[in-house]
């Protein structure tokens, strides 16, 4: 399999993580990385075992490099649309962190543009590649629990993000719960057709200041007739990632990953370590596997496992949840799609 040369646009936490993860992928070579603040990247690249990586303050240096076949867009969400369009125009395959954009109409346009260009586009929903999540999906598709009837996803962060992040995040549904919306489609093998969301500010008034919530429950109805419930919290003091899929012939469940399975039993009680602290620790392997699948799709000519359309569908559910919360009613996803068509 040929080696794929890549460039990374955006060298924040996730951009650096991807660059470091690709050191272990023999079929991938990070050729360049760009960021608005490149000065510290040279020392980071050397310390991270990436001494040959070209560092730049301009993303155009990556897009104009004819040897670079693909780009990873890891910059803030409000920059994604313009970068995607320029990358497609430059003939680059794209891996884009979620969400593709904050604007549903613009994301829908990207889906069509990717089709027209015939290039690879993978959306960064890393949880599909988690060893637990992917196993549940595999067993559901194999019919091991019969017809899926009920889905329950619990996703709670250990600590809320800083106010600077909250202000530009797009809100809980588009920033946090969007992973759960993608997992729901992935695990149930059925599209979501209706959403009913409830939310509250129970942790910190700063969320209300930015017209956001920190606690939510979202009810889903699938095209198959199955039902789902997602609950989210921005502060659980531990990272809570549990899933249950109940079907006509059985049930599948995922518990939290912990650093070890040792338990201390004493007269005072039974104790074990808390779950892995946060997403970087919990989904370490998933981040590697999603990049591996992207590179293999380019090198081998296969379809990417998480497409631009998947990114659009998760955003569609998120926007339906926002509308449901605001209007206090169930929202059919078709209602939003009809509104989009009328805008075109």
Image (tube, rainbow, N blue to C red):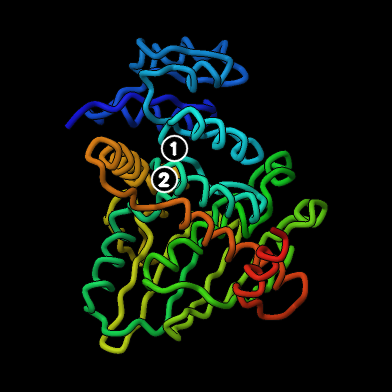
Q: Which of the two residues, 122 or 64, is positioned nearer the viewer here?
A: 64
- Residue 148: % across, % down: 35, 81
Density class for disc 1 (Cα within 10 Å; few <14, some 14-19, many ≥20) is many
Q: Residue at x 36, y 22 (%)?
A: 30
Q: Which residue is mark 1?
A: 94
Q: Secondary structure at mark 1?
A: strand
User: Could you tell me if the residues under marks 2 and 1 are in contact, i.e. CB atoms within 8 Å?
Assistant: yes
Q: Residue at x 37, y 76 (%)?
A: 245
Using the image, determine if residue 280 lies above or below residue 319: above
Q: Secondary structure at mark 2?
A: strand
Tell me: 163 left or right of 248.
right
Q: Which of the two residues, 104 or 242, is positioned nearer the viewer here?
A: 104
Density class for disc 2 (Cα within 10 Å; few <14, some 14-19, many ≥20) is many
Q: Which of the two residues, 236 or 270, is positioned nearer the viewer here?
A: 236
Q: Which residue is mark 2?
A: 122
Tell me: 151 left or right of 131.
right
Give whichever of discs 2 and 1 has the lower sequence position.
1
Residue farthest toward the right in the current orientation of the protein: 209
Location of residue 205 (image quadrant): bottom right
- Residue 170: % across, % down: 68, 50
Q: Residue at x 42, y 54 (%)?
A: 274
- Residue 316: % across, % down: 59, 63
Q: Residue at x 62, y 35 (%)?
A: 82
- Residue 289: % across, % down: 30, 44
Using the image, determine if residue 256 lies above or below residue 217: above
Using the image, determine if residue 108 lies above or below residue 9: below
């Amino acid at each position: 399999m040929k080696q794929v040369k890549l460039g990374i646009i955006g060298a924040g936490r996730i951009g650096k993580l991807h660059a470091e993860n690709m050191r272990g992928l023999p079929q991938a070579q990070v050729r360049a990385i760009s960021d608005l603040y490149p000065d510290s990247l040279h020392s980071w690249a050397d310390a991270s075992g990436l001494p040959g990586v070209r560092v730049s303050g301009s993303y155009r240096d990556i897009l104009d490099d004819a040897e670079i076949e693909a780009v990873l867009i890891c910059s803030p969400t409000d920059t994604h649309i313009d970068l995607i369009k320029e990358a497609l125009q430059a003939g680059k395959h794209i891996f884009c962190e979620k969400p593709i954009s904050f604007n549903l109409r613009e994301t829908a346009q990207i889906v069509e543009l990717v089709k027209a260009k015939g290039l690879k586009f993978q959306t960064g929903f890393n949880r599909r590649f988690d060893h637990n999540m992917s196993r549940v999906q595999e067993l559901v598709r194999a019919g091991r629990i019969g017809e899926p009837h009920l889905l329950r996803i619990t996703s709670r962060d250990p600590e809320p993000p800083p106010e600077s992040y909250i202000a530009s995040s797009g809100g809980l549904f588009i920033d946090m719960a969007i992973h759960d919306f993608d997992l729901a489609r992935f695990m149930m093998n059925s599209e979501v057709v209706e959403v009913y969301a409830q939310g509250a500010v129970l942790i910190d008034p700063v969320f209300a200041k930015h017209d956001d919530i920190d606690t939510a429950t979202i009810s889903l109805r699938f095209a198959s007739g199955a039902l789902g419930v997602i609950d989210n919290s921005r502060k659980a003091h531990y990272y809570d990632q549990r899933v249950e899929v109940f079907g006509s012939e059985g049930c599948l469940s995922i518990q939290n990953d912990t650093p070890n399975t040792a338990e201390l039993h004493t007269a005072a009680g039974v104790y074990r370590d808390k779950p892995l602290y946060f997403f970087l620790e919990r989904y370490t392997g998933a981040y590697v596997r999603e990049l591996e699948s992207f590179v293999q799709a380019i090198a081998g000519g296969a379809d990417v496992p998480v497409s631009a359309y998947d990114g659009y569908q998760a955003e569609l559910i998120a926007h339906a949840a926002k509308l449901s919360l605001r209007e206090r009613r169930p929202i059919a996803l078709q209602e939003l799609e009809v509104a989009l068509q009328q805008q075109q």
